[in-house]
Structure formats: C-alpha cells, structure tokens
Amino acid sequence: MQSQISVLNFDLVGLYERRKRGNLTHEQNVELKEKKKKSDKKEHRNQEIKRKEALFEDNAELRTRLNIRAKHGSFVFNEQK
C-alpha cells in the first residue's frame, strides 16, 4: 500500500511541476485530478488501517470479541453473540 502511495505522489510531483510552468495539457490536468483523488483515498485507507491496528494492539480482547483477523486490509466485523 505504501509503495502505491509513493508512486502516485511521485507522479503528482511531476504533474504539479508541469502545471507550475504552464506546460500541462488538458489530458494531463484530468490525470492530475484523478491521481490526486486516488492518492488521497489510498492515504486515508492506510491511516484507517493504522488506527485500527493501534486500537487492537492496545486491546487484544476487542479483536477477539469482534472476531477480526490480524491480517492487514481484512477487517471483517462479525460480532460474536
């Protein structure tokens, strides 16, 4: 996940530099907006995963009660009754 964010950020830097110099085409401007939205979404998801992991590290019983797998990206909430 982090490597995907890094690649998107690298692409965004190049597009922002072209826009700053006035060399950005309409297609590149559309690409810039799409990549920015995609980067923001991936960064938000990555932060969300980190917050949940920190919560479960502090309270291991919570992970057991909610029946959540420890693998990243696989938060399935099945509350045990």
Image (spheres, rainbow, N blue to C red):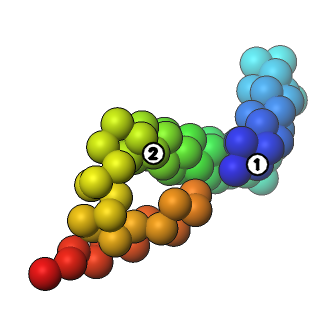
For the residue marked with disc 2, what is the amino acid?
Answer: Glu
Q: Nearer the viewer, residue 2 or 39?
A: 2
Q: What is the x, y in percent for residue 54?
A: 42, 37
Find residue 4 and name its label.
1
| In the depicted structure, whether residue 67 falls above or below residue 41 | below
Tell me the SS state at disc 2. helix
- Mark closer to the observer (2, 1): 2
Q: Is residue 49 visible?
A: yes
- Classify 10 Å Cα crowding around label 1: few (below 14), some (14-19), many (20 and above): few
Q: Residue at x 76, y 18 (%)?
A: 20
Q: What is the x, y in percent for residue 35?
A: 68, 48
Q: In the figure, is residue 7 to the left or right of 53?
A: right
Tell me the SS state at disc 1. helix
| In the depicted structure, whether residue 43 falls above or below residue 62 | above
**Mark 2–mark 1 contact, CB under 8 Å?**
no
For the residue marked with disc 1, what is the amino acid?
Answer: Gln
Q: Residue at x 70, y 50 (%)?
A: 1
Q: Which residue is mark 2?
A: 53
Q: What is the x, y in percent for residue 10?
A: 83, 33
Q: How many callouts does the rendering have?
A: 2
**Quadrant location of residue 22?**
top right
